[in-house]
């Protein structure tokens, strides 16, 4: 099991990091008391669970329990349990600005104000920073850039959930799918409805499939759209989007759109997308 401990300075982006890792398919726990780390690893490693990637945020919010973290890490080392520590930090100016913008108090509440609290936290975390595998300075980056760094870090990691693409066929006569992120209009293709022997069939029938795919423009459309979707996969991931809906529509949602959704699903299978194909209007009319 891949174990990642996210820690660092308050205001440095740990909340963004753990949300990004959840999007990547990690089982995530925020503000985990260090004394429970071993118990959490044990629970997630059980035979009855299916958790391959665990991420936990452990920081000074744990209060007096935070002192137990080094002991817990030592226990993991003694047990030969691999883990990775990601430490997030930022300079004082960036942290001060973020606390002022969010109007949130620092978890250490030093009498000298926010800067004093930041200084105390740096001292408390100095040893943990030294144990970190990866240190990310977020002073000059935004949330999107931090998410992008984490996506790059775990790109291709075995066992992580693949991004999902829903391919939906529909008929324009019944309206657009409200959840579609991208819509392609297939009404430029010859319509099997006007072929007597194909009219009462649907796009799952081999005869309709051969009729639609036998057109040069169908082949070109599939090539261009599949190439576009593959290109956009990494772009969506960097923005934290793991679920995308692409709708393909024809007049009634029974012939052309069904054929091309099925064909596109086959092309994208095994390409790094988890593909879900459905036909919204196939049974209508």
Image (cartoon, rainbow, N blue to C red):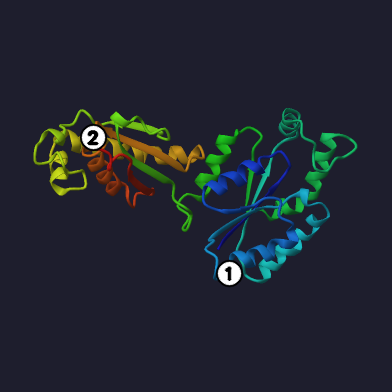
**Along the viewing direction, whichever of 40 and 281 lies nearer the viewer:** 281
Q: Going by the image, does 270 lie left or right of 63?
A: left
Q: Going by the image, does 162 lie left or right of 55?
A: left
Looking at this view, name the residue that lies furthest to the front. 285
Which numbered tag is attached to residue 221? 2
> Residue 230: horizontal and vertical position, in percent?
35, 41
Q: Quadrant of the C terminus?
A: top left
Q: Residue at x 42, y 40 (%)?
A: 244
**Label 1: which secondary element:** loop
Q: Residue at x 34, y 31 (%)?
A: 183
> Residue 23: horizontal and vertical position, in percent?
53, 46
Looking at this view, name the residue that lies furthest to the right. 111
Q: Quadrant of residue 167?
A: top left
How far separated are the C-alphas under marks 2 and 1? 47 Å
**Along the viewing direction, whichever of 161 and 80 lies nearer the viewer:** 161
Can you identify the residue that label 1 sits on? Answer: 46
Q: Quadrant of residue 232?
A: top left
Q: Going by the image, does 189 lie left or right of 24?
A: left
Considering only vertical position in the picture, is 155 above or below 248?
Answer: below
**Along the viewing direction, whichever of 266 and 251 lies nearer the viewer:** 251
């Amino acid at each position: 099991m891949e174990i990642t401990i996210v820690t660092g300075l308050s205001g440095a982006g740990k909340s963004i990091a753990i949300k990004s890792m959840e999007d990547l398919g990690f089982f995530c726990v925020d503000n985990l008391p260090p004394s429970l780390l071993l118990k959490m690893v044990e629970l997630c490693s059980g035979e009855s669970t299916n958790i391959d990637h665990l991420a936990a945020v452990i920081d000074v919010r744990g209060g007096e329990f935070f002192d137990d973290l080094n002991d817990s890490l030592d226990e993991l080392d003694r047990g030969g349990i691999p883990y990775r520590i990601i430490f997030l930090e930022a300079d004082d100016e960036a942290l001060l600005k973020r606390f002022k913008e969010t109007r949130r108090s620092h978890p250490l509440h030093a009498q000298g104000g926010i800067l004093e609290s930041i200084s105390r936290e740096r001292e408390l975390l100095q040893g943990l920073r030294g144990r970190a595998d990866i240190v990310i300075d977020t002073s000059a980056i935004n949330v999107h850039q931090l998410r992008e760094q984490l996506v790059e870090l775990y790109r291709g990691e075995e066992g992580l959930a693949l991004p999902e693409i829903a391919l939906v066929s529909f008929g324009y006569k019944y309206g657009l799918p409200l959840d579609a992120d991208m819509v392609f209009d297939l009404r430029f293709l010859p319509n099997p409805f006007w072929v007597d022997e194909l009219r009462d069939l649907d796009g799952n029938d081999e005869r309709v499939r051969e009729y639609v795919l036998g057109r040069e423009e169908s082949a070109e459309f599939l090539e261009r759209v599949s190439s576009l979707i593959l290109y956009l996969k990494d772009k969506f991931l960097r923005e934290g989007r793991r679920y995308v809906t692409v709708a393909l529509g024809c007049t009634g949602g029974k012939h052309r759109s069904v054929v091309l959704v099925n064909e596109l699903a086959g092309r994208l299978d095994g390409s790094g997308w988890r593909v879900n194909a459905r036909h919204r209007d196939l049974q209508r009319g």
